[in-house]
Amino acid sequence: MNKKLAAALSGGAVLVLALSGCTSSSSKGNDKLDAWAKQVCDAVQPQAKKIEAANAAIQKQTSDNSTPDDVRKTDAQAFQDMSDAYKAIGDAVQKAGAPDVDNGAKKQTDAVKELNDIAASYAALKKQVDGLDVKDQAKFADGLKGIATSLDKLSTSGNDALKTLEAGDVGKSMAKQSSCKSASAAPSPAGS
């Protein structure tokens, strides 16, 4: 059952990598925008690693011989880490200010709201995991199924504001940043 949770979780990592994984096409220089992108990318990189580590922990815990208690502890910690990471990314985008592009302030506000919503969703999943009954295997499996469904919805739902934020010149500036390149070059956990 936890395999379904791990598969659903893999989709969630895509959200942060969307923010850090920009295509590398050259753009005419915009020093203000490049400075903004560097500030955001430098802040995103450690958070992307934190999300990746949380994903890896859940993947590792998917073996069928893990006890429900181990699975619950690992999943709860992973969801807490993800919540913290998305909140930190939202804070970084907020702190960086509006990017120097058309509608930059709106794009920034929308992305920060979206990142905070994602953080809140992971915090809610942590609460759900904490509440699972580890003494009853069947109830535990049913609870995990519900969490996997919520996670699936979370991983396929809106990162539209992030895509909008990093479209055009913002994406080009982010692509130039070595910290964004290294964050997006991280191996994807999806193939397990």
Image (spheres, helix red, strand yellow):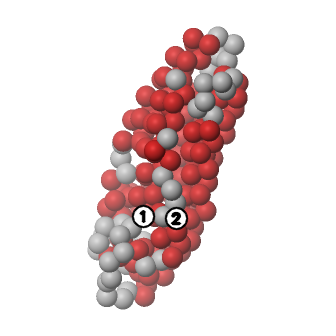
68 to the left or right of 115 = right
177 to the left or right of 79 = left
Q: Position of residue 14 (x, y in %)?
A: 43, 51
Q: Position of residue 65 (x, y in %)?
A: 66, 24
Residue ID at (36%, 42%): 157
Above or below, 122 relative to 29: above
- Sequence-wise, the earlier of marks 1 and 2 is 1
The answer to whether one can see residue 105 in this image is no
Q: Position of residue 176 (x, y in %)?
A: 43, 79
Q: Position of residue 132 (x, y in %)?
A: 62, 21
Residue to which mark 1 is pinned: 21
Residue to which mark 2 is pinned: 183
The answer to whether one can see residue 20 in this image is yes
Towards the viewer: 172 or 187: 187
Residue ID at (54%, 28%): 2
Residue ID at (56%, 65%): 45
**Given the image, on which type of amino acid does mark 1 rest?**
Gly
**Given the image, on which type of amino acid does mark 2 rest?**
Ala
Q: How many marks?
A: 2
Residue ID at (37%, 51%): 159
Q: Quadrant of residue 92?
A: bottom right
Q: Do residues under tags 1 and 2 come within 8 Å of each other at their CB atoms?
A: yes
Q: Secondary structure at mark 2?
A: helix
Q: Secondary structure at mark 1?
A: loop
Above or below, 89 relative to 11: below
Q: CA distance from mark 1 to mark 2?
A: 7 Å
Density class for disc 1 (Cα within 10 Å; few <14, some 14-19, many ≥20) is many
Density class for disc 2 (Cα within 10 Å; few <14, some 14-19, many ≥20) is many
Indicate which disc residue 166 carries: none
